[in-house]
Image: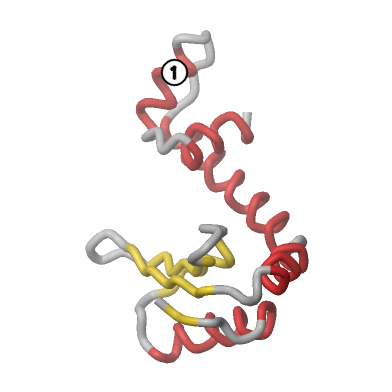
Amino acid sequence: MVIAVGFLRWLFNYQHEEIQLLLESRGIFISTGEISKLSEEFLLRFYVLHRKHHSLMKKMFEKNGGYVLHLDGTAESGDEITFTAKEGITGFTIDSWIMPSESHEYIMPFLESIRKKYGKPLAVV
């Protein structure tokens, strides 16, 4: 169920209520709260798998002559920020952290972590 909910939520961008309706049409009745828990569990497992294989992405970036770092922070008003780093040519998500603000004290460790794993980028957007 974790994978099904995770794909619906994060790959197909379904909202909690849309997932609930789709599952109900298949005879599966779960709350939107449970859908939220399952989608978070999917993200945590995916994140661990992603981090475990970062060396494969690094090899691909090196083969391509380097990487372009694209940074973006998003949040709802008053919420923590999801700060994401993507590789600009392939579109691969390199890393993502949740932080209280986009201040220097939170951004610098994030950027240092990326540089440590992948080296210096060709450019930053």
Check the image and name the residue furthest to the left: 77
Which image quadrant for residue 62?
bottom right
- 28 lies left or right of 75: right
Q: Mark 1 points at which residue?
A: 22
- Name the one closer to the observer, 111 or 38: 111
Is residue 51 shown left or right of residue 26?
A: right
Where residue 77 sits, quadrant-wise, is bottom left
Q: Residue at x 59, y 29 (%)?
A: 4
| In the image: residue 37, left or right of residue 13 | right
On the image, the x and y values in percent for residue 80 come to 36, 67
Q: Label 1's element?
A: helix
Q: Residue 31 at what x, y percent from top left?
A: 44, 28
Residue occupying image coordinates x 60% and y 44%: 42
- Give the image quarter of residue 115: bottom right
Query: Within 10 angstroms of label 1, few (less than 14), some, or many (20 or more) residues?
Result: some
Q: What is the image's colouring?
A: secondary structure
Asked whether 122 or 51 is in front, the reply is 122
Q: In which quarter of the image is the N terminus?
A: top right
Q: Where is residue 99 in the image (x, y as percent from the top left)?
A: 43, 73
Task: Please tell me how many numbered marks the rendered image carries.
Answer: 1
Q: Quadrant of the C terminus?
A: bottom left
The answer to whether 24 appears left or right of 3 in the picture is left
Kindly identify the residue that appears in the image at 51 percent across and 74 percent down. 68
Amino acid type assigned to the residue bearing label 1 in the image: Leu
At which x and y percent is residue 90? 55, 59
> Relative to 98, is 122 above or below?
below
Instruction: Please state which of residues 117 and 96 is positioned toward the viewer in this rendering.
Output: 117
